[in-house]
Every structure is written in C-alpha cells, then in structure tokens.
Amino acid sequence: MAFESMEDWLKYSHDRNISAAEAVILEDMSDRGVSREETWSRMSAMWNAMKSSEQSYDRSLRSHSGLVGGAAGQMEDYLKAGDSLCGDVMGKVIMRALRLGESNACMKRIVAAPTAGACGVLPAVLVTAAGQGGFSDDQMTEALFAAAGIGQIIAARAYIAGAMGGCQAEIGSASSMAAGALACLKGGSPEQMADAAAIAMKNLLGLVCDPVAGLVEVPCVKRNVIGAVNAMAAADMALAGIRSTIPADQVFDAMKEVGDKMSSSLRETAEGGLAATAAGRAVSERLKKNR
Amino acid sequence: MNLYDILGPVMVGPSSSHTAGAVRIGLITRRLLGEAPAKADIALAGSFAATGKGHGTDRALAAGLLGMQPDDIRIPRSLELAKDQGMEIQFREIQLKDAHPNTALLHVEAGSGRELELQASSLGGGRIMVNKLDGIDVNFTGESHTLIVHNLDQPGHVAEVTSMLSHKSVNIATMQLYRNKRGGYAVMVLETDQPIPEDSIAWLSHLEGVIKVTYLNTMQEDEHGV
Ligand code: SF4
C-alpha cells in the first residue's frame, strides 16, 4: 500500500535512513510487484516526456476554440528584452508553464501531472531548476518520485480532480507536488519537503474549477503559471527553514473539507465563476453556434 | 492510487477524460471487433456531446478506431487519416438515460461484415468502462485480459468456459453473467490474470450454442495501427 500520510512516509524514511524518494520507490516496488529497474525506467520516461513536451512547443498553434495559443511566445519575446519584473529564472518558469498549458489545449503530447489541465506546473519548475542547478536526469527522476509520492497522499486524503474538489485539487495538488520535489532536489530534508508541499497547497486552498465553455483553456493555461510560481516560492520558504504551522496531512484534509463544501457549479460544470461571467458565457454561446 | 495514476499518462491533450479516455474507447472497440472497422457510426452523449468538439473527442475516438494509443501525435489529424484509409465515420448526438456524463455509443462494421455495438464511458484519468455490448449490459475496463462469450442461454456453457480456463492454468479474476431473457441470449464476461491461448479461443467459438467469442489481450498495448 502506498503511504496515506506524510507522517508515515517521513517515519518510514527516518527509520530506514533513506531519502523520501527512495521510500516511494520501495513502496511502488512492493505495491505493484515490480523491480527497481522497471519503476525507475518508467519514471525516467516520464521525465523525458516532460522535457520533450516543453521543447516541442509551437507558438503558431491555436486551440480548436481559438481561445488560447501563442502566449508563451509573447512571454519569450518579452523576456529577451531583459527587463521583466520577475527576472530570468521566474520568467522562464512562467514561460514554460504557458508553453505546456497551451500545448495541452492544442492537442500536443503532454504528461498528466496529476491531470492534463495541470500538466504545466511540474515541468515548468523542474526543467527550469535542472538548467539552473545543473542537475542530472537521475536527480530529476528522483525528484519526480518525491512529487508522485506527495500526489499519492493527496489522492488518498482528498482528491486530484477538478470535478471533485475544484481547481485546488488540480493546480493546488500539482503545485504542492512541485514544491516538495524542488525542496528534495535542492537537498532539503524530508521535513522541508513536507513543509514546501504544505505551504504550496495552503496558498491555493479554495481555488475553484470554472473553465469557460467547459474547455481546459481559460483559466487553466494561466493557472499553471500560478501553480508553478507558487511552488518555487513555497520551496524557497521551506528551504530557508520557514515552517508550516499546519502540517501537510492536515492541510490536505482541509483541502478535502473545502472541496466537499464547494458548490457543484464551481467543480468543472462550467456553471459558475469565470465560466458564468458575461464574457465567459459569450464564448460558450459562440462555440455552441459553431457546433 | 498507484504512482503512475498520479504521474501520467503521457497523452495528447487537452483532457484525460474527453481526449485520452475517448482514444481508449475507440481502441477497445477496434480490438473487440478484431479488425479495422470500415464504417463507424458514433453517437456522443452528455458532456461528450456538449464539449467534445473543443476537447477533440471526435478526433480521439477516430484515432482509437485507427488503432492509435492516447499518446499518438497523429490524433489531431485522425479524421483526415481515416478518410485516406477509406474508413467512413459518422458523428451524431444522442440522449442516453442513466448514462455517465462522458459516454459514447459506437456501431462499427468491418469489411468482413463483422459488426459490433458498444457503449462506453470515460471515468477520468484516461480510464474507461464498457457499459453495453451488442445491447446487453456489461461492466469491464479492458485493463485486464478479458474474454467475452455470447451464447444461447442454456445449461453448460459456463462450465465449458471455466473448465477450459482451469485446464490452461488461467486464473479468473472476475466473472459476470448477463442475459436478455430466460432461454434467450446470454453474455459472459471474464477478466483473467493470465493471457488465454489463441487455440482455446478458437475451440470455444466452435462449440454448439456459442454465438460469438471476443478476446481482449492487454499485452497488445504496443499496437499502433493506421
Ligand atoms: S480550472 Fe478546472 S479544468 Fe482548469 S485546470 Fe483548474 S481544475 Fe483543471
């Protein structure tokens, strides 16, 4: 059985004096009855798929609805001028999150992490961190194991689908997974990983799922940006030694409670929030006519 | 959930339920038919009908019928590829009572004349469930080796199938029995832990009272079609 709490996970790692990622590998081997090589090569394939999905971005593509496409190209041009507020590293994180979000909307190949709608968060921060810190593919693969381990705990205690718990369950979960992965990558302790994951989720608690016309485009593409930027900030806070007052497990439980209380109009039904605005409805009407 | 339900699948966007799941529905239809369909009538229900176009659900279903996997980069061009191959695909909308919101009803016909009607829904995360096969209620996901036997509703057929499997050391994971009416037409759906040998499938299909045998081997994951 996979870990169902951060507490169990950290205890397991401490007792055996192994890294958090190593604990996830051992759990997966016993859970699915596979060898280390098998799970390692599958995870490294995920990392390679993430890298190539980021590189294969095509700024000329537009989604079927025409709502999204090209934004990452605009961001790239803007960054080239060297005068952005966020600077080079955060600028790249923003650009990459847009690339993936747009590529997904334009029917290109991506890795659902944990969902297709939130597919930009992990690659945006991890590809950027790999370039910045000179990390090897093996180190990146290890970080993905940590990310997936966090996602498993979130899925066990709450959910990872917008239709069930709102966007906090998709972008929030992706951001929490990414923050923890970054903390591990930078050599943080398992406690720092847990704090990074907790802080990232806390910052996105309550985020609703309100896709315009029911399509994974608006606001999804740009929400990948906030998930990624938030993950970077949360990881840096945790690595600075800043603690999360509420432990990760309780944060995830709170996410579930908030999601359960969310009206169904704010859970992917496209009946509330941005989808229900005048501009949102106008898009939906236009698409209906073309159907 | 296992690790790769969290990270993955690698897929063509934009939606695991409306795109990746739809590819799998097309693909399972092709596999159950046992050959490439020449004609397909596809009816979209619920959210598949409402937001399917924007999610590429039509192209995803066609891609599956062409034998593509959810990560095939040709999915966006599948309708053109189908046309090039002479596969005729028709789409329409349909209202289905008591169906999951993401449901499609497919009627396919092969060049050989073999036909199949299948109703399936996309459950999220790219996972699917087949709900109806040739008009009879069923429930299977296609994630395990699956044997489907259509037979006349008369004594002995279940025993024939299970004793064949035990003889071949194939372990049954789940088994479901359905029929339209007593003494009418019945369907058995068995999910097994091991693959079933081809000659055993052929043997089954020649038994008296057995109308049709369909087998889905999960080992065929590498099928890339077109
Ligand atoms: S708004 Fe809804 S569909 Fe869009 S990314 Fe968030 S959870 Fe997914």
Image (cartoon, coloured by chain):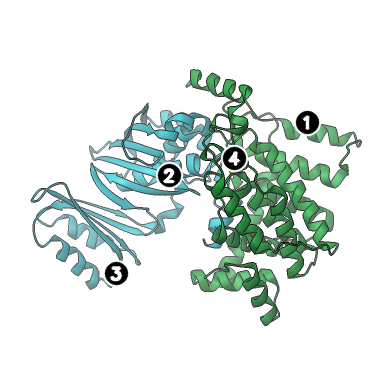
- The residues tagged by marks 2 and 1 sit, at their Cα atoms, a distance apart of 35 Å
Chain to which the residue tagged by mark 4 belongs: A
Q: How many marks?
A: 4
**From what the image shows, is residue B51 above or below residue B65?**
above
Compute the Cα span from label 4 to label 3: 45 Å
The color chain B is rendered in: cyan
Determine if marks 4 and 2 fall on one subunit: no
Report which quarter residue A286 is drawn in: top right
Residue pointed to by mark 1: A74
Q: Observer-nearest residue: A194 or A88?
A: A194
| Callout 3: chain | B
Q: Choose top left, top right, bottom left or bottom right for residue B36.
A: top left
First-in-chain label (1 vs 4): 1
Front tag of 3 and 2? 2
Query: Quick check: can you spot residue A134?
Result: no
Task: Provide residue A144's location: percent of width, then percent of height.
Answer: 67, 60
Contact? badges 4 and 2 (CB < 8 Å): no
Work out how far the residue at label 3 is from the one at label 2, CA to CA, in angstroms.
29 Å
| Disc 4 C-beta below 8 A from ligand 1 | yes
Q: Chain A: what color?
A: green
Q: For the residues carrying marks 1 and 3, which lies nearer the camera in this image?
A: 1
Give x and y (percent) for residue B120.
35, 43
